[in-house]
Image (tube, rainbow, N blue to C red):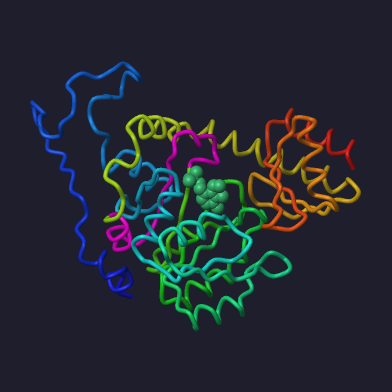
Amino acid sequence: MDIRKLVKPNIRSLRAYQAEEIPCRVKLDANESPFGMTVLKSVRTNRYPDPGARELRKLVAAELRVRPENVLHGNGSDELIYCLIAAFGGPVMYPVPTFSMYGIIAQALGERRIEVPLDGAFDLDIKNCASHVKKSRPRLVFLSSPNNPTGNSFSHDRIVRIIRQSGGIVVVDEAYQPFSDKKSFVPLLKKHRNLVVLRTLSKIGLAALRVGFMIADKDVVTEVNKVRLPFNVNALSQKVATDALRNREQRKGNINRIVAGRKMLLKNLEGIEGITVYPSDANFILFRVNNGDRVHRELLRHGILIRNMKGVAEGCLRVSVGAERENRAFLKALRVLM
Ligand code: PMP
């Protein structure tokens, strides 16, 4: 597969912005100020950040057992979704319900959208997907697995079939993968050049930093990198993210606490009459109640805010796994209401 032929013609001929890092004694090439301000001792605020986020990419590459050339950094994975659509264009295909930004960005960039409803178990409707892939030849397919807002992972085989059948790029968005015991698609990158995996630090306690990653074939990285703005991840975020990622123990500990909280919530929700709970591999749970609007409103009267999925997954509410105290407060208020 020639990745260069897949990108839009205007991107094919584009050259990525070059921000050269030349070692020097006196740096007067970038219209920076010589006077920094004290924020974090190790961050020089007067200089532009490393445009290539090399430390951070090296760390992520090592952790995921890929090469730094296979990793591209984004100001959150949102930005990488934007860059992918800007580079490859449409049609953009995705199942529904799913993460809303795929559709919003495709529309904002004037690209055609193909929405394929999930099946009754919130899994990919493989027949319908295959026929759309064949008929409409989407240049990009977005599959959030685990899926937001349903919480489940799509079946591995169905995703692989779409990757195989598609003549375009297939993005497996693994924003919630750290909370799942299903296999990541990162090891499959070696086999499928049209596969892109998205990761983010937002769900593991670093949402404020706005840092996400795309892992892909280096030709895909080269093309998408052309539409990335040069200094998209700021120096503070690069520094804090690097330090945080090195603290593996704390990171894994927090993830384990969320998974334990999810188990506790699932078990308790299942015991409340009038609620249908859906399985979750993520850090949130989708559930259905008879009067979703009322339950949502009444919970808020108790000071508890969850997400009303009206218009996305009818009658459904989505609750994020919180700290133990928050989970208990939510369950207590819900029991009173139900
Ligand atoms: N992908 C999915 C599936 C998400 O749910 C989200 C956040 N809601 C994102 C990507 C974006 O994450 P961020 O931009 O914070 O990295």
When the figure is inspected, residue 87 is found, relative to residue 284, above or below; the finding is below
Quadrant assignment for the C terminus: top right
Q: Is residue 71 visible?
A: yes
Asked whether, in this view, residue 233 is left or right of residue 318, the answer is left
- Left or right, 40 with reference to 185: left
Looking at this view, is 327 or 296 the one in front? 296
Q: Position of residue 99 (x, y in %)?
A: 57, 55
Q: Residue at image x 41%, y 72%?
A: 168
* Residue plotted at (80% across, 30% down): 302
Q: How many marks?
A: 0
Inspect the magenta stretch and tell me whether residue 218 lies in it.
yes
Residue 264, how many percent across, how many down?
77, 40
Q: Is residue 177 visible?
A: no
- Residue 79, image x, y percentages: 41, 49
Horizontally, is 106 left or right of 235 in the view?
right
Residue plotted at (77% across, 42% down): 296
Q: Which residues are magenta?
A: 201-225
Magenta run includes residue 17: no
Residue most extreme to the top:
38
Specify whether 73 is left or right of 9.
right
As displayed, is residue 29 above or below residue 178? above
Residue 192 occupies quadrant:
bottom left
- Residue at 50 percent across and 78 percent down: it is 133
Check the image and report above or below for 266 versus 113.
above
Q: Nearer the viewer, residue 146 or 78?
A: 78
Q: Quadrant of residue 22?
A: top left
Q: Quadrant of the N terminus?
A: bottom left
Please provide percent x and percent y for residue 60.
Answer: 40, 45
